[in-house]
Image: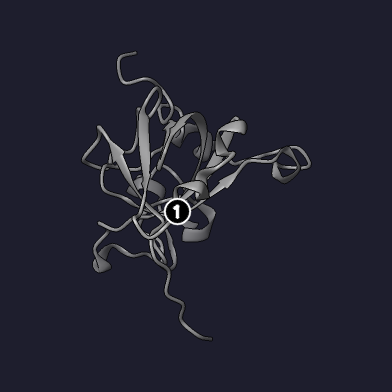
Amino acid sequence: MADYTVSPIGIVRAARAQAEDDFWGGSEAAIQLVDSLPEDALEGIDTFSHVEVIYLFDRVPPENIVSGARHPRNNPDWPRAGIFAQRGKGRPNRLGATVCRVLRREGRTLYVAELDAIDGTPVLDIKPVLREFLPRGEVHQPDWATELMRDYWKHPDV
């Protein structure tokens, strides 16, 4: 299979400079388009309530990449799960994806709420969230995943 090269379409500007596992609630970030893209690439994005942001975990060192199973967050109380059965940043292609609320657009910058990416993170794509692409049935997950996410979207001041 061929390898592919992708280039960032933007960069995250956020208050957080270090990756943390929890307390992303209430966070706001800006996504600034790269100079090679025209401003009108964002035209109409602010008519959507949410976007999905695909980004690169660019600061994960190669030795932290996991391709098999592990305990999520290295917690032995949770069962081993394959890397594709969890959302950890040390994945083979280091891709992250988060659905964010659109706050506003100002020229070449899109402002979003609750993007769990740190300052300087390369953004590879932005897609509007369409309800037709949301789950078409009941969503279920194992108990360990619910426990893992318990504080993820809490506001840090709560």
Residue ID at (26%, 48%): 120
Q: Nearer the viewer, residue 157 or 43?
A: 43
Left or right of residue 136, residue 22 in this image? left
Q: How is the image coloured?
A: one colour
Q: Position of residue 112 (x, y in %)?
A: 44, 32
Q: Residues within 10 Å of mark 1 (few under 14, many from 20)?
A: few
Q: Which residue is mark 1?
A: 38
The three-letter amino acid code for the residue at tag 1 is: Pro
Q: Nearer the viewer, residue 156 or 141?
A: 156
The image shows residue 45, relative to residue 87, as above or below, that is above
Circle 1 SS class = loop
The image shows residue 148, relative to residue 5, as above or below, that is above
Q: Position of residue 117 (x, y in %)?
A: 35, 43
Q: Nearer the viewer, residue 28 or 10?
A: 10
Count of numbered circles on the image: 1
Q: Position of residue 39 (x, y in %)?
A: 45, 47
Q: Which quadrant of the structure image shows residue 154? A: top left
Q: Nearer the viewer, residue 97 or 44?
A: 44
Extreme residue toward the bottom, this view? 1
Q: Looking at the rendering, in which quadrant would you find the C terminus?
A: top left
Residue ID at (21%, 40%): 17
Extreme residue toward the top, this view? 158
Q: Position of residue 52 (x, y in %)?
A: 54, 44
Q: Which quadrant of the structure image shows residue 48? A: top right
Left or right of residue 11, residue 132 in this image? right
